[in-house]
Each structure stands twice: as C-alpha cells, then as structure tokens.
C-alpha cells in the first residue's frame, strides 16, 4: 500500500522520536499512547506507519513495553550514581538517620582520635583543638588616653550596666549571652578585610584568617556553654535582638574607624575576663554547681577526662585574654598610621 507524502513525513517524525526512547522514555511513551491515537484519527495511513516502524525494530508494542524501558534506564542510572567518584558513592547520614547518596562524590572524611576511637564532632576537627595558655597575664589593661579610646572605654562600660541588671549572678546565662556578642566582631572584621583585599588586589598579612579564627573560637565558647546553661525563650529573644543591633553597629564602626572598632573589642574582652573571674568565685563558693565539663569542651581544649566546669571557665577566660591582646594590638597598629597588612597577624594566638 502506497503512503502519501504526509504519511511518509509523519513516519519519519515518529521514527525519530522512537529512536530516542532510551534517552527520552517518557516522550516515547506519550507518543505511543496519545499522539499515535490522534495521528490514526487524522490519517488512516498511520496503521501502515506503525507496521513499518515495527518491522524496523522500534518498541511500539504499547505503553507497558515503554514503561519497562524507562524503568530499566532508571535502574541503570542509579547504578551509575552508586558507582561514581572512583567506584564509591559519597554517603552521609541525614537528620532522619537515613543515608544520603551524593552523585558528586563529596563525602565527609572519617577522623579518629589518637587512641583510635571515632571522632564524633563535625563542627571542628582534631587539628583545630589546642591547649589553652593559662599563664597569660589577666590583669593587663589599656589605659584610655585619646578621645577615641575614651569613647570605646565608656561605650563598653555603658553596655555592662544593663547586662548586670538583667543577668545579675546567673553567670552561666551571662556567659552564653556574652559569647553571642563576642563572636560577632571577628566575623565582621574578617569579612570587611576580605572585601578590602579583593577590591585593592592586596594581601591581608594573615589578619583575615586571624579574625575569623577569633570568631570561631568565640562560637565554640557558646557551643560549650549551651551544654551547661539551657537558655529560656526570652533569653533567646534577647540574643536575637542584641545580635541584630550589635552586628550593624559594629559594621558601621569598623567602616568609619577600624582602630575604634578594635579598641572596643579590646575593652569588651577585658570585661569578659572580669565576668569569668566572678564566675570562678561563685564556683569556689559553691553557689554554682561545679558539674563535669561537657564532652565538646574536653575535646576542643584537650582537657583531662575528669575536668569540671571550673576548668572550662579557666580556659575560656584565657582565650578572652588572648583576644584582648590581639584587638588592642590591632588598634595600636592603626594608631601608628599603618594598615593591619603591614604587620603579620598572630595566627593561632587563641
């Protein structure tokens, strides 16, 4: 039976669609189930087209055969994904406990402690831990002389008054609140120095990394005290409000005057040393229970297994003293008319 020109054109179109059945099984199935019916109603020669395509070996037996082809392709794709990234798929345990398979081959590294046990912290790694320097001078103080120094000093003093009124002697909650604020300046300063380095095509002298290290260290303080003091809902609301105000205020201060911004942080750290000293006094008096140290603190500061909350407060206070020195040092660099990049940053100086 001779086909018309229109029938031959439709036969070529259908054969092209069905020849890509492996790549587009859904399209081929739709053609077989729906479009083919429309073609048969429009042109009686479609029956001859189907016969021709069937003799050519294309899968036109129906939607069941097409769905089988699509299922087979899906199973093959899953096998390819499982065998990607050098023959092993990247898996991770999600929040629901099930494994997440990654096509991109990105998998978290498995780390062990020195004794061979599995490292259970994903927020920091063993090479990021350290022993705090408890011999640092806690009484050092920068005497405010210049106008900006006095502005920084009295700004911090004015912030201490409402904190004392709100928290009084609840030093666990006070420490938690303090760390949510103390972790902001390093991140803001590091971010602004990062952008400055990009704009000016210049190195930072390591100060970007130093300030981000400070921010991460302060955040680890917060993660530790979260295990000790469970904040109430209104304390969480206060943290959100204070952080929103302080972040933007410090951002503007750093843009206007980096030496003022670093001096403010230096005085904030001096106040933190004072707060943690009072915390230790309350622990010694027995007004606050000297509970065992959280596991995260033991691993982060490499503390003995039998460490207590007092040991944690002592290492945190030492960290704050180091941050005090770094920020006063950074402010002094600006006071001498230089940029931070002109003096190497004290990397690793916690």
Image (cartoon, rainbow, N blue to C red):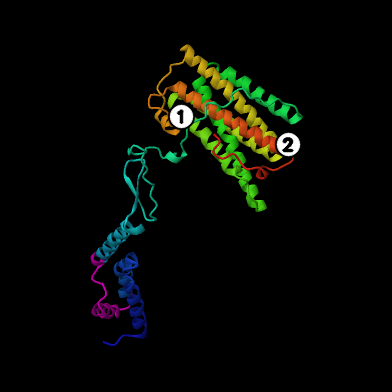
- Element carrying mark 1: helix
| Residue at 34% across, 58% down | 86
Which residue is under mark 1? Answer: 224
Identify the disc placed on residue 12.
Answer: none
Q: Earlier in the sequence, mark 2 or mark 1?
A: 1
- Residue toward you, 332 or 179: 332
Residue 149 highlighted magenta (yes or no)? no
Label 2, label 1: how many angstroms apart (C-alpha)?
35 Å
- Residue toward you, 100 or 87: 87
Circle nearer the viewer, 2 or 1: 2
| Residue at 61% across, 34% down | 326
| Residue 337 relative to residue 217: left or right | right
- How packed is label 1: few (under 14 Cα within 10 Å), some, or many (20 or more)? many
- Residue toward you, 343 or 256: 343
Whether 31 is drawn above or below 142: the answer is below
Q: Which residues are magenta?
A: 42-65
Residue located farthest toward the bottom when viewing the structure as drawn: 2
- How packed is label 2: few (under 14 Cα within 10 Å), some, or many (20 or more)? some
Which residue is under mark 2? Answer: 335
| Residue 2 relative to residue 105: left or right | left
Q: Is residue 241 visible?
A: no
Residue 245, percent from left and from top: 61, 32
Residue located farthest toward the front when viewing the structure as drawn: 135
Whether 80 is drawn above or below 332: the answer is below
Residue 224, percent from left and from top: 46, 29
Query: Tag count in the figure?
Result: 2
Position of the C terminus, as image quadrant, is: top right
Q: Is residue 3 visible?
A: yes
């Amino acid at each position: 039976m001779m086909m018309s020109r229109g029938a031959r054109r439709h036969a070529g179109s259908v054969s092209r669609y069905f020849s890509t059945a492996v790549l587009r099984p859904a399209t081929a199935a739709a053609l077989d189930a729906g479009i083919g019916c429309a073609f048969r109603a429009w042109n009686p020669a479609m029956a001859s087209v189907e016969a021709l395509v069937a003799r050519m070996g294309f899968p036109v037996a129906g939607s069941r055969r097409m769905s089988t082809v699509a299922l087979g392709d899906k199973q093959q794709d899953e096998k390819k994904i499982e065998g990607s990234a050098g023959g092993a798929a990247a898996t991770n345990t999600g929040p629901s406990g099930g494994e997440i398979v990654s096509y991109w081959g990105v998998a978290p590294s498995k780390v062990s402690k020195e004794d061979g046990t599995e490292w259970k912290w994903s927020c920091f790694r063993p090479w990021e831990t350290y022993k705090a320097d408890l011999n640092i001078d806690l009484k050092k103080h920068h005497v405010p002389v210049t106008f900006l120094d006095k502005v920084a000093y009295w700004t911090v003093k004015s912030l201490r008054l409402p904190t004392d009124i709100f928290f009084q002697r609840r030093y666990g909650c006070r420490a938690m609140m303090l760390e949510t604020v103390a972790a902001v300046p390093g991140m803001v300063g590091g971010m602004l120095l990062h952008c400055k380095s990009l704009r000016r095509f210049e190195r930072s002298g390591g100060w970007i990394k130093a300030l981000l290290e400070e921010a991460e260290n302060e955040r680890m303080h917060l993660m530790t005290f979260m295990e000790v003091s469970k904040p109430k809902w209104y304390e969480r609301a206060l943290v959100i409000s204070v952080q929103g105000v302080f972040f933007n205020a410090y951002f503007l201060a750093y843009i206007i005057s980096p030496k003022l911004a670093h001096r403010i942080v230096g005085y904030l750290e001096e106040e933190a040393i004072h707060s943690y000293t009072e915390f230790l006094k309350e622990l010694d008096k027995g007004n606050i229970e000297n509970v065992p140290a959280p596991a995260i603190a033991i691993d982060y500061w490499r503390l003995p297994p039998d460490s207590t909350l007092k040991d944690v407060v002592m290492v945190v206070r030492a960290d704050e003293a180091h941050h005090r020195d770094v920020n006063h040092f950074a402010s002094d660099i600006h006071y001498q008319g230089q940029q931070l990049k002109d003096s190497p940053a004290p990397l690793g100086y916690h």
